[in-house]
């Protein structure tokens, strides 16, 4: 596999388009895959909150911190997932807003593209997520 993100098949459509496709196929499976990928590639910036007991735990929320912004996906248990963006200054959340999935995934995709540049392990993990 090439170390250049532009050489990846899914990158031709864009990371956000590939993620949106995955989201559209199965929201809960997308949430599980995204959590696993973020824990592997960006563990220091990722928080995963789970609910349930023992081996039956389900992901309730994923949060990715990127400095002054936090991007979160929440699973309310039924219905569609909630996509949120929070503006943070000095560790204090100032404004949280709900976003449309395509808008959230577009911003998130741009962040991911920047973070995985030059990292073969990240590219391989992202390929598994979107393929």
Image: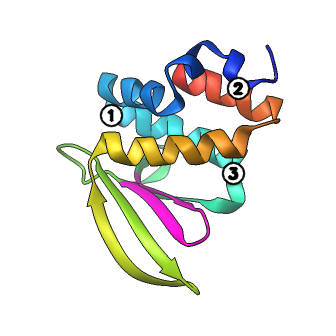
CA neighbours of label 1 inside 10 A, class few (<14), some (14 to 19), many (20+)? some
Query: Mark 3 or mark 1: which comes first in sequence?
Result: 1
Tell me where residue 79 appears, x and y as whole percent: 17, 43
Mark 2 to mark 1: distance in Å? 25 Å
Secondary structure of the residue carrying tag 3 is loop
71 up-or-down from 1: above or below? below
Q: What segment is highlighted magenta in the picture?
A: 60-73
Tell me where residue 17 appears, x and y as whole percent: 43, 27
Q: Is residue 46 left or right of residue 3?
A: left
Mark 3 to mark 1: distance in Å? 21 Å
Predominant secondary structure, magenta span: strand
Tell me where residue 123 appears, x and y as whole percent: 72, 29
The quarter of the picture where the C terminus appears is top right
- Residue occupied by mark 1: 27
The structure residue drawn at horizontal position 69% and vertical position 51%, both measured from the top left corner, is 42
Q: Is residue 122 left or right of residue 126?
A: right
Secondary structure of the residue carrying tag 2 is helix
The structure residue drawn at horizontal position 71% and vertical position 61%, both measured from the top left corner, is 44
The structure residue drawn at horizontal position 52% and vertical position 39%, both measured from the top left corner, is 34
- Residue occupied by mark 3: 42
Tell me where residue 86 appears, x and y as whole percent: 41, 70
Q: Between tags 3 and 2, which lies in front? A: 2
Q: Between tags 2 and 1, which lies in front? A: 2
Query: Mark 3 or mark 2: which comes first in sequence?
Result: 2
Secondary structure of the residue carrying tag 1 is helix
């Amino acid at each position: 596999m090439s170390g250049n993100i532009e050489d990846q098949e899914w990158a031709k459509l864009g990371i956000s388009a590939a993620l949106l496709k995955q989201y559209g196929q199965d929201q809960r499976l997308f949430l599980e895959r995204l959590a696993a990928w973020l824990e592997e590639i960006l563990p220091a910036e990722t928080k995963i909150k789970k609910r349930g007991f023992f081996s039956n735990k389900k992901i309730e929320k994923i949060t990715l911190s990127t400095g002054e912004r936090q991007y979160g996906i929440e699973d309310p248990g039924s219905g569609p997932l909630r996509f949120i963006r929070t503006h943070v200054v000095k560790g204090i959340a100032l404004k949280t807003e709900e976003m449309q999935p395509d808008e959230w995934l577009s911003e998130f995709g741009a962040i991911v593209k920047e973070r995985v540049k030059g990292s073969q392990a990240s590219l391989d993990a992202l390929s598994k997520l979107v393929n």
